[in-house]
Each structure stands twice: as C-alpha cells, then as structure tokens.
Image: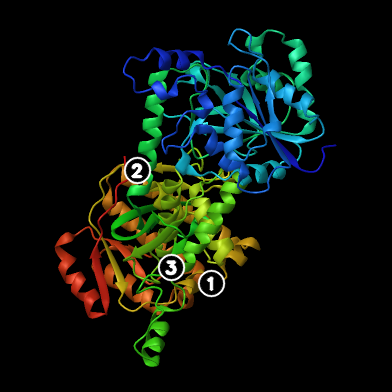
C-alpha cells in the first residue's frame, strides 16, 4: 500500500557526448559559453535553462512531498550550483557515479538508485527526464497529470505527445492507445513507420504506483546489459510482457533533445519552439460554422433514421478566440443585450428575441470541453483566452443557429489548444456538440445538424439502430453532386420552433405503430432521394420532398405543424415546387423544377410576409 503523497524523481544523468563534443569543437565562438554545460542546463527559447522550466512546473504548488534529482559524477558540480541558485535542496541530488557514456548505468537503473538511496519503495512516483526541451509557453499544468493519475487508481500513467511531421518513429518509443479507455495497448521501441499507424511518442514522463516501482529491480536483474536499461526498454517489458495496466495522457507540447542529439538538432528545436510560441501569441483564431437545411428525412435522426442535409453559406456563426491574461466570454451586442433604451425597449426585444442568447452556448461549450479533455487524458495548456461570437442565422426558424455557435466555439478551442481529430475524432464531434446543448442547456435536439456542420457539404447520414449501437455514431458520407437551384422561405417574424417536436419522442418510446412506420418511411424516402440526387433526377427529388412533408404532417398533425408553416408549403406547391420543412419549423426549403416561375413565386411569398433566399451551398473544406 503506497504511503499518502507523491514523490517526484528528475533524471539528468545522461552524458550527451555528441552534443558536448560538437559544442566543444565549434570554431565560430558562438557556443563557447556552453562548453561543459550539461544538456539539462542549456538555454531554452526564452533564455531560461531547460531544467528551470521543469522545476517551475514541479514547484508551483505543493504537489509533491519531496523531489529528488539523479545526475552523474561528471556533471554533479553543475547541478549542485543550479540547486543552490534555484532553491532546490542540495541533499536531494543523487550521484550515480558515472563519468562517461561508457560507464553510465542507464535511466532505469538511475531510477532504482533513487528508490534505494532515499527509501522510496512505499511511495507513488512521478519520474521525468529533466533534459527534455519542450515549448515553455505551453505552460502545461503538472497538476492535471497528477489528477488524471488519481482518476486511474488501478494503473500507471505514461505521457505522450503527437509527433511533428518531421519526426521519425524510429527515433522514439511509440504507444498505441485505446481510444475509449486510454489504456496503452502496446509499446513499440523505435518502430519503422510500417509497423504502426500511431504517431504518439512516449517520453520519460511517467507516474508509477509503488507496486509498479517495486518491479524495477526485477527488470534490471533480467537485463544486465546497460543498453537494455533505458526507460523505453523497461516500458516495453512492463506493458507488452508483464501486461501491467498503463494509461496514456496526451500533453499539448512536443518534447525534444531526447537521446544522442547534436548541435544542429539543438539549434533547430530551440528555433522551432520559439517560432511556435510566437505564432501562438500573435493572431486571434476565427472559426466559422454554417447553417444547415434538412433536405430529406428530417427529423428522423432522433429515431434511428436516415437523413440528407446541406450546409449553406448564406447563414453562418463564427467564434473568435485570442490569448488574454484572464478568461473572458464576450456577450454579443445584439443577441446578448445588457443595455436597453428603455423599459419598453427591453419588453419589445425580450418579447421578440426571448432571453436565451449565445453567451450561455460559449460557456457551456468551454465547460464541456474542459471535462472532455480531463476525462480523456488530454492536458490543456495554462493559457487564458477571450472568446466571442457573431452570427447572421435568423432565430427560431429551424436553421441550427445554436449548434452553429457551439460548433464554431469547439473549433476555436481545439485550434487554440492544438487539438486535432486524433484527440476528438470527427465522428464524435457531433455528439460532443449535442451533449453541450442537451446535457448542459436542456435544448431539445438531434445529431443530424451537428454532423453536417462538422462535415459540411451535402451529407447522407445513416442513424440505423444497429449502426449506432455498434459504432457509437452513424455512418456519414458526402454526396458529391451539384444541386439545382434551391430556395429558402421563412417568416420575417420568428416563431416558437420547439413546438414542432410535440410529444413525438414519447410516442416513439412507447412503440406506437404509426410512429415507428412513419419514421421508417422517412428513412426509405431518404434512400430514394439519395438515388435521385446521384442521378440528377430533380423532378423525382421534388416529388420526394413533397412526400417527405406529407408523412411528417400525418405524424405531427396540422395543429402541431401550424398554419404558418402550412401556408408556406402550399405557396410553393401552387407553383409546382417540392417543398418541405428544413428543420423544426418557421421556414421551408423548396426545389422548383420550372425556374421560369421563380420570380412570380417569390412575389407570392413576399406578399405573405416571407423572406425568400436563393440557397448557396457550402462545400466541405478540402
């Protein structure tokens, strides 16, 4: 049983012969001041020494009951002087006795030395290599690492990062991580690219339970050759052979100067990390998400159905994020009003717009994002930001305005913290957005809006129950077809978009035959529509759109669909258009085969107080 508290061991006993020799042999004089300096005490991009940044990360809070540093006899004096200047206890420096690479004992043996000399066998241990260069402006919070370790009481923890394109798998230990549990399934020591698809590089940054630390002597006894006493070899043995449960946690920065590197490597990585830091702090990030229209199947996505939806560039929401000293969410001047001309003005705006602007969407997205990363073992940098949004999507007409704001905010947060689709799979991002709305804000919604806003373009979605249960998400594919002219008509005054859903979910859950059959018919219509689209059979597509609405009207009844929606449907049909609701109500989307009637139909809609917009499809980004 481990004693209460956590101990940290910093390993700096490497001899870095190649780097030391090249610094010594350099004739330019630029590196004369670095001669004899151990790798861990070389300057980083911000002028501090590499080890200073590790000590800053470790020493910022009372996270450890003690911290020890293992070095060698050759460089002991350098670290003794560093400790005196850095308020590190000199008595906690452990000398492994080696003076050259030839008589070094290996990182795993250095770790055991600390365990023996300081009698640490009953403690949980965090061990790091203190000579690894990382992006100091990332300011990762080591407390997040410890918190995640405590979340996994039955396993150990290994830190990894996603390699840069210029890095080769043959230079690192590579881990294959289970995307659901975060358990490391396999550790590969410097594999060839064809041996693994993973680009997750493991480094000497581990947290071990006392039971695991007790296995180190066994490993050393079985592997007397110093070449096998690296931490990579130890972890490979621990995970692959001993089947010890080790979880992975991704940090937001890469780690470099690992192993025998030269002067050019040092120069290149110092320059790279400096450029990265400058780029991060320089420009705000703006991300946009587009409104969508449900072309077919809507709203069967919530009932294990099938749908076809299209993003349109006419209407959009965007979010902008930039680094700041404190975290700020900026209210929108129109959608989140806090100042009014008068009480009468407040009454009029509230009556028309309601009380629910976009600020709550930003806040809920940030909260859910932090929770997701903590749960998935993704450490976020300690960078504050200012987040704002803008949108031109008309409210309450079923064009997915709320999910567009959440989608844009999620894209901003992922870009700001350097997360990729590997950290949050594209197939899972729509579910994240839906969870923000449903779990945090109790907004009634389904997956299809979020899917098409992530994938963009004309997207076919299969939410069949067997698919959802097996994969945890639907099957999504782009229909790469140039659509004919489509129009959107909506009421100039907003309506209550929530009422259109009625009690359909309850009836579905009760297994009412009419509802089950109706949703199946909507799914069948979607498949037929996909065929018509692929064949550019626009007359058939228009007929299917009309049939789609007829099925929906039968399911939901005239009273629920509402007179205003019915009136917009009938205007389009009067001119021979295929017309249906693109969302939850307040607007219709139409396909008019005879385009010579378009202007006459437009005037008819306008006489009824509708706005008519020519749809501009938004193609997916390549």
The mark nearer the N terminus, 2 or 1, is: 2
Along the line of sight, the residue nearer the viewer: 527 or 472: 472
Q: Residue at x 40, y 87 (%)?
A: 346
Residue 316 sits in quarter: bottom left
Could you tell me how far apart the alpha carbons at marks 1 and 3 are, in whole angstroms? Answer: 25 Å
Q: Is residue 601 above or below residue 547?
A: below
Say whether marks 2 and 1 touch (CB < 8 Å). Answer: no
Q: Residue at x 48, y 24 (%)?
A: 257
Confirm whether residue 98 shows in the render. yes
Q: Secondary structure at mark 2?
A: helix
Nearest to viewer (mark 2 / mark 3): 2
Confirm whether residue 471 shows in the render. no
Q: Residues within 10 Å of mark 3 (few under 14, many from 20)?
A: many
Could you tell me how far apart the alpha carbons at marks 2 and 1 are, in whole angstroms? Answer: 50 Å
* Residue topped by disc 1: 502
Along the line of sight, the residue nearer the viewer: 69 or 155: 69
Left or right side of 28 for 3:
right
Say whether marks 2 and 3 touch (CB < 8 Å). Answer: no
Q: Residue 174: x and y, percent?
A: 55, 24
Q: Is residue 140 above or below residue 266?
A: below
Q: Residue 573: x and y, percent?
A: 29, 68
Nearest to viewer (mark 1 / mark 3): 3
Residue 496 sits in quarter: bottom left
The mark nearer the N terminus, 1 or 3, is: 3
Residue 279, numbered circle: 2
How many numbered markers are drawn? 3
Q: Residue 530: x and y, percent?
A: 37, 46
Residue 596 sits in quarter: bottom left
* Residue topped by disc 3: 358
Of all residues, the one furthest to the right in this rendering is 1
């Amino acid at each position: 049983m481990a004693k209460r508290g956590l101990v940290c061991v910093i390993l700096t006993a490497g001899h870095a012969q190649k780097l030391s020799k090249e610094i010594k042999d350099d004739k330019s004089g630029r590196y004369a001041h670095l001669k004899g300096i151990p790798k861990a005490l070389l300057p980083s991009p911000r002028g501090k020494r590499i080890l200073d940044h590790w000590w800053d990360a470790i020493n910022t809070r009372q996270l450890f009951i003690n911290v020890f540093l293992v070095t060698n006899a050759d460089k002991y004096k350098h670290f003794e002087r560093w400790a005196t200047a850095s308020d590190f206890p000199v008595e906690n420096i452990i000398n492994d006795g080696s003076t050259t690479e030839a008589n070094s004992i290996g990182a795993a043996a250095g770790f055991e030395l600390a365990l023996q000399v300081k009698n640490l066998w009953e403690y949980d241990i965090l061990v790091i290599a203190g000579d690894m260069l990382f992006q100091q402006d990332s300011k990762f919070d080591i407390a997040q690492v410890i918190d995640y370790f405590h979340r996994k009481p039955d396993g150990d923890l290994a830190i990894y990062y996603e390699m840069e394109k210029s890095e080769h798998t043959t230079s690192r230990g590579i881990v294959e991580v289970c995307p659901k549990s975060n358990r490391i399934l396999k550790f590969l020591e410097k594999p060839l690219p064809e041996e693994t698809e993973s680009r997750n590089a493991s480094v000497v940054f581990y947290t071990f339970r006392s039971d695991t630390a007790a296995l180190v002597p066994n490993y050393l006894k079985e592997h007397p050759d110093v070449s096998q006493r690296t931490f990579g070899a130890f972890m490979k043995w621990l995970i692959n052979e001993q089947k010890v449960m080790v979880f992975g946690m991704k940090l937001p920065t890469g780690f470099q100067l690992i192993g025998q590197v030269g002067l050019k490597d040092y120069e290149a990585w110092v320059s790279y990390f400096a450029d990265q830091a400058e780029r991060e702090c320089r420009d705000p990030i703006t991300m946009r998400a587009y409104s969508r229209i449900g072309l077919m199947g809507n709203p069967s996505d919530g009932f294990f159905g099938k749908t076809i939806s299209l993003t349109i560039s006419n209407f959009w929401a965007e979010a902008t994020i930039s680094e700041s000293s404190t975290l700020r969410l900026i209210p929108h001047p129109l959608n989140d009003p806090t100042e009014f001309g008068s009480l009468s003005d407040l009454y009029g705006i509230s009556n028309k717009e309601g009380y629910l602007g976009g600020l709550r969407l930003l806040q809920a997205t940030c909260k859910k994002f932090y929770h997701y990363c903590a749960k998935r073992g993704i450490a976020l940098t300690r960078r504050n930001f200012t987040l704002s949004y803008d949108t031109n999507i008309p409210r309450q007409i079923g064009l997915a305005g709320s999910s567009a704001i959440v989608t844009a905010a999620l894209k901003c947060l992922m870009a700001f913290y350097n997360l990729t689709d590997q950290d949050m799979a594209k197939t899972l991002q729509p579910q994240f957005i839906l969870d923000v709305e449903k779990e945090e804000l109790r907004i009634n919604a389904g997956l299809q809006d979020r899917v098409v806003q992530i994938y963009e373009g004309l997207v076919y979605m299969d939410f069949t129950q067997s698919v959802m249960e097996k994969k945890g998400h639907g099957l999504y594919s782009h229909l790469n077809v140039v659509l004919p002219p489509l129009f959107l008509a909506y009421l100039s005054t907003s309506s209550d978009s929530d009422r259109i859903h009625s009690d359909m979910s309850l009836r579905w859950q009760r297994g009412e035959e009419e509802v089950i059959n109706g949703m199946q018919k909507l799914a069948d219509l979607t498949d037929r529509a996909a065929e018509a689209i692929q064949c550019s059979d626009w007359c058939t597509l228009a007929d299917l759109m009309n049939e789609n609405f007829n099925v929906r009207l039968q399911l939901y009844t005239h009273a629920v669909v509402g007179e205003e929606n019915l009136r917009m449907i009938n205007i389009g049909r009067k001119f021979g258009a295929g017309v249906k609701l693109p969302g939850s109500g307040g607007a219709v989307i139409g396909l008019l085969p005879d385009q010579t009637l378009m202007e006459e139909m437009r005037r008819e809609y306008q006489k009824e107080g509708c706005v008519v917009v020519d749809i501009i499809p938004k193609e997916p980004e390549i």
